[in-house]
Amino acid sequence: MNSALSITKNIHDWLFSIMPETAASIAEMVLIALVYLGIFAIAGLFLVLLERRVAAWFQLRIGPNRVGFQGLLQTMADAIKLLSKELTGTSKADKFLYNLAPYFVIISSLMALSVFPFTKEFQAFDINIGLFFLIAVSSIGVIGILLGGWSSNNKFAMIGAMRSGVQTISYELSIGLSLLTMVLITGSLQLSEIVEVQKSGWLIVQGHIPAIIAFMIYMIAGTAETNRAPFDMVEAESELGAGFHTEYSGMKFAYFFLAEFINMFIIAAIATTVFFGAWLSPFGITESIPVLGVFWFLLKALILVFLMMWFRWTFPRLRIDQLLTLEWKYLLPLNLANIVIMALLVWLNLTISF
Amino acid sequence: METTTLTSNFKSEEYFINMGPQHPATHGVLRLLLTIDGEIIKKVEPDLGYIHRSIEKMCERDSYQQIVHLTDRMDYLSANINNEAVCLTVENALQLEIPDRVKVIRTIIGELTRISSHCLWWGVMGMDVGALTTYFYGFRDRELLNDIFEETCGARLTMNYNVPGGLMFDIHPNFVKRVKEFITHFKTKLPEYDRLLTDNIIFQKRAIGVGVLSKEDAISYGASGPVGRASGYSCDVRKHHPYSALDKVTFNEALRTEGDTYARYLVRIQEMWESMSIVEQLIDNIPEGEHRVATNAVIKLPKGEYYQKVETARGELGVYVISTGTKSPYRLKFRSPGFSNLSLLNHIAVGGKIGDLVATMATLDLVIPDIDR
Amino acid sequence: MKNEELQELIGSWSPNLTFTEEGSQYLNVTVPIEELHDIMFKLKHNDETDLDYLFCLSGVDWGEELGVVYHLESTNFRHILVVKTQTAERENPVIDSVYDIWATAEFHEREVFDFFGIIFTNHPNLKRLFLTDDWDGFPLRKDYEDNINMIIK
């Protein structure tokens, strides 16, 4: 059953045997980038369909089920339609920035995707500051949003972009602090180390009360980070236009749209890695088959994605000032208190481990 | 419509946004010119007339039976009650003796129309505030009522069941059974509405304290219906000037004193309960009798002036007829509830935020064809 | 208050008012234009009439005169009064606005201006409401002609 993992090793050895060192490592990186682009595209397609079916289920209807088996080719059809659309642009828009903006959000999502441990030794880059890298990279996406709003030369797009920027920057604090709470138990920022520590029980069980609080804060902040309901005042359809991506159409719009779904997946994947043990099976039942780790990882991530979709279709929206009040007056103090409690727990050796 | 000139002093930090005629939150073709400063609203100016069809001028040329057909298109969500208003005006003017059966059926259908209108209002309220799923739940229940109307009245939206003199046809044999089934079903659904939206903390934070209207202002601005009742002004026409079979039933008037968006919301939810109770009191004892009294083919009202008030789902609708004895009225004026309710929008939205404006407009429950006539 | 009592009380404020109950369900008072604002003010603020709810303001073209009909109700006593006023000046009809007494009059008077051309003094924002700003003529007047849009039987 190690055939899947040995494939990566075999390709690595083969590349290094036919080319000189530097060319081989560059070729290897290009190959990895292409594979991840493929994962990005397929994941995006699948997640969009999932969102539509889940929304339809909540709204007592069926959702797309005609194009392909159970609607699996629906997003492909939508993407082809988007490709064939005219790329409109305003004449007064700053051309260079207008075209550059979507790429920022794509690049930040791809970079974040590349560090996840899908299963044992199936990780593109295992750097020693893994968690810190993830948080830093997700901040780059904000630049894309602000650029998109500013360069559209549209009053409403700019208002939307400003609101979105403020929201994202505020909630990044909460994400960082709640992840930091868990790092207190593991003692390391490296993602594979974090998974190692969880072999004696998932971190949410090890940290019990403060870990559960940290998880709840993380889910709230994560939903706000990706501008999803109930924090989607920015793109609220019943208010001012479509927010920062009003002036985009065709493929560029598709980039923003896909990037939102991939960000949702990234938030869920970070939560799976840090709280729920990434690719480890519950009670170690399939420990002997490492390739099944991918299955466990995806299952846990998809459950969290479903939770985020549930939020979107049930709750009303918060007003922009209520959103910021929530972060700065409630979540931040709660987070800081939580870190202190967790630190006490670890110092007094009160964590549960098996 | 061309740009209208602003009547306020235009300072340089303020800017001017158009919530144009096509907008998901304005429930119809209404154009609002907002002057805002950051997120705070300084002035709201409505721009009407996008669906003005000169109904009042047409009424000066048409016969009374034809006028009844025009009223469906005014406030299409309470179409039955609008028809009832004109029919009652004509019947009172001619002093016709209407059988009890007709009165009871008119009241039942009027209350079912009220429930149907409030179901749609609830769905759209949730959608405006951001909970998109409530729209489907509201429509699911409204569909059951539309089916009942289709079977008995012949149409789902513009029913036209009332004629001067009675009803156009007698009720379908299945009517009583289906209405009872609906009541039983809906009684389990209204608590679901409460769990989804009324008790939701996010919704409460969006609605409590927003768009406050005091009682004196409500009376001065001519607010009626749930908007007036939420501010403590007891304005239910069914209580003060009862018509049809409404003096034979007992029900409570839904009154609250806070006057904010949440109070208007709760008043409408309570009205749905009260309407169900009225229907329950009447549905089992529909008296036997004729469903229509014969009138002349050409109806001519005696010379004079006549006024009839009814309570639609939006508020008080008034029909004012000046007749000179000919086959068409000399002047017919419809006093529409939405018209007065819209005039208070500027008063309660100023000083709030744009998100508050959307929530307030959802609770004012405006139907623009009613305002524009 | 009953109609007789209302008639006595209001009749005592001015000798130029005419009362009638014929052809209507409610008591009608016809007020000359000059005294309109005073009488309306007293009708609202007098403790015995207390007519604080203006529920209908309609313009009427009586053939030779243009007039306005006000329907007033009291929220405490629940009696209804109808006030009428008219002017024979069809070219330039001017009536006092009652916006400062009942705020609902703002939109209603704009509608009457739009359809009949009656100008209300002291109105905060008197411009056309439903029709476009450059519309010619006043449609609800009886002598309005429009060969394209009106279909007359």
Image (cartoon, coloured by chain):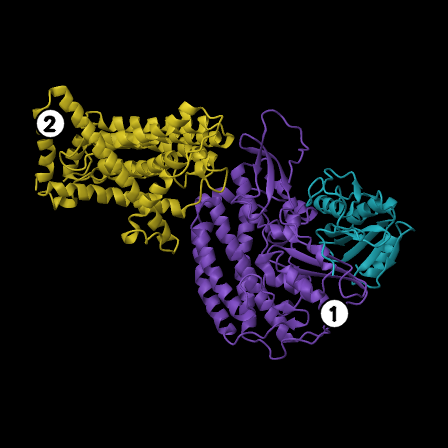
Chain colours: A yellow, B purple, C cyan
Quadrant where the C terminus of chain C sits is bottom right
Residue kind at label 2, given as amino acid type: Leu
- Which percent across, then down, holds residue A175? 32, 32
Mark 2 secondary-structure assignment: helix
User: Which subunit holds the residue at mark 1?
Assistant: B
Residues B139 and A36: in front is: A36
Q: Is residue A307 visible?
A: no
- Is the residue B276 above or below the residue A20 in the image? below
Q: Are marks 1 and 2 in contact (CB under 8 Å)?
A: no
Query: Which corner quadrant of the image does residue B246 belong to?
Result: bottom right
Chain containing the residue with disc 2 = A
Say left or right for B236 vs C85.
left
Q: Which residue is mark 1?
A: B299
Q: In front: mark 1 or mark 2?
A: 2
Question: Which quarter shows the N terminus of chain C?
Answer: bottom right
- In this view, the residue in front, A29 or B175, is A29
Q: Amino acid at mark 1?
A: Ile
| SS for callout 1 | loop
- State the image coordinates of residue A214 (x, y, percent, origin top left): 30, 36
Task: Look at 47% across and 57% down and name the residue there.
Answer: B139
Position of residue A19 measured from the top left corner of the image (x, y, whole percent):
11, 23
Classify residue C77 by image quadrant: bottom right
Asked whether residue C101 appears in the rendered view, the answer is yes
In this rendering, is residue A285 above or below B316? above
Neighbour class for label 1 at 10 Å: few (<14), some, many (≥20)? Answer: some
The residue at which mark 2 appears reads as A15
Residue C138 lies left or right of residue B128; in this view the side is: right
From the viewer's perspective, tell me whether residue B285 is left or right of residue C38: left
Label 1 – label 2 distance at C-alpha: 97 Å
Name the residue located 66 percent from the left edge and 33 percent from the top edge. B6
